[in-house]
Image (spheres, helix red, strand yellow):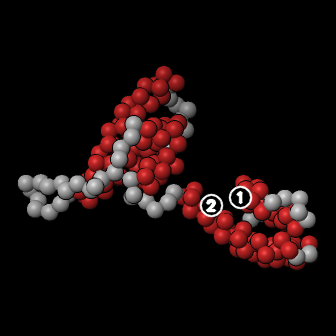
Amino acid sequence: MKPKIRSSQYEYDMADWLTEKAKAMLTETTLLYQSLGKSDALSEELVGSLEKRFDYIFRNATKMLAFASGSDWDAEDGKLIIKSGKSGLEQVLVKYGLMKETTEDKRKGEIHAFLKKLKPLAFESMQVIRDETRRILSEAKLGSDIIDSIIGLLGQVSKGKLSWDKFVSKATELF
């Protein structure tokens, strides 16, 4: 349940404001944390020390965001951001109901929508599979090597050598 946060300074509920500020703080801190990992100028000792501090920051910032958004906090929330960076932050935001889906989930949905268009082709001749797959996947702006690989996989489906689910899994990896 989302709390009502009141201030003697303002007469309205400050929960949305706190959510917005905590989310912005987590986003900026995540970007800062990720940039540290890319820096060759810092010693391993300093990076290790900073990681402990970031762990503490992420732990407390996720607590504040969970509280403000009325979500359940878990000690793993901050650790997920440490482990996976921006992707981990998105997973936390989805968990807290502040994002509908992660960028990765959205991308997978787009890929599955493309692949769904290919399913009827599994019952066609290889020429139709090649031509139509190229036409459909031209929208995805994929390289010709990837398109050729997908055509090959779809040909295996049409010959009964590969199940549709395995095709989807392998084609998703190619995207």
Of mark 1 and mark 2, the one earlier in the sequence is 2
For the point 47% across and 26% down, the residue is 48
Q: Is residue 167 left or right of residue 16?
A: right
For the point 41% across and 28% down, the residue is 52
Residue pointed to by mark 2 = 108
Residue 51 location in percent, x, y?
44, 31
Crowd around label 1: few <14 · some 14–19 · many ≥20 (10 Å)? some
Q: Is residue 48 above or below residue 101?
A: above
Q: Is residue 103 at least partly visible in the picture?
A: yes
Quarter that holds the N terminus = bottom left
Q: Looking at this rendering, what residue extends furthest in the left direction?
A: 8
Q: Is residue 109 left or right of residue 10?
A: right
Q: Nearer the viewer, residue 111 or 51?
A: 111
Residue 49 location in percent, x, y?
43, 25
Q: Is residue 33 at least partly visible in the picture?
A: no
Residue 41 location in percent, x, y?
52, 31
Q: Nearer the viewer, residue 117 or 137?
A: 117
SS at badge 1:
helix
For the point 39% across and 58% down, the residue is 98
Q: Amino acid at mark 1?
A: Thr
Q: Looking at this rendering, what residue extends furthest in the top direction?
A: 45
Residue pointed to by mark 1 = 172
Number of numbered markers:
2
Q: Is residue 151 left or right of residue 118?
A: right
Q: Is residue 8 left or right of residue 149?
A: left
Crowd around label 2: few <14 · some 14–19 · many ≥20 (10 Å)? some
Quarter that holds the C terminus = bottom right
Check contact, mark 1 vs mark 2: CB within 8 A.
Answer: yes
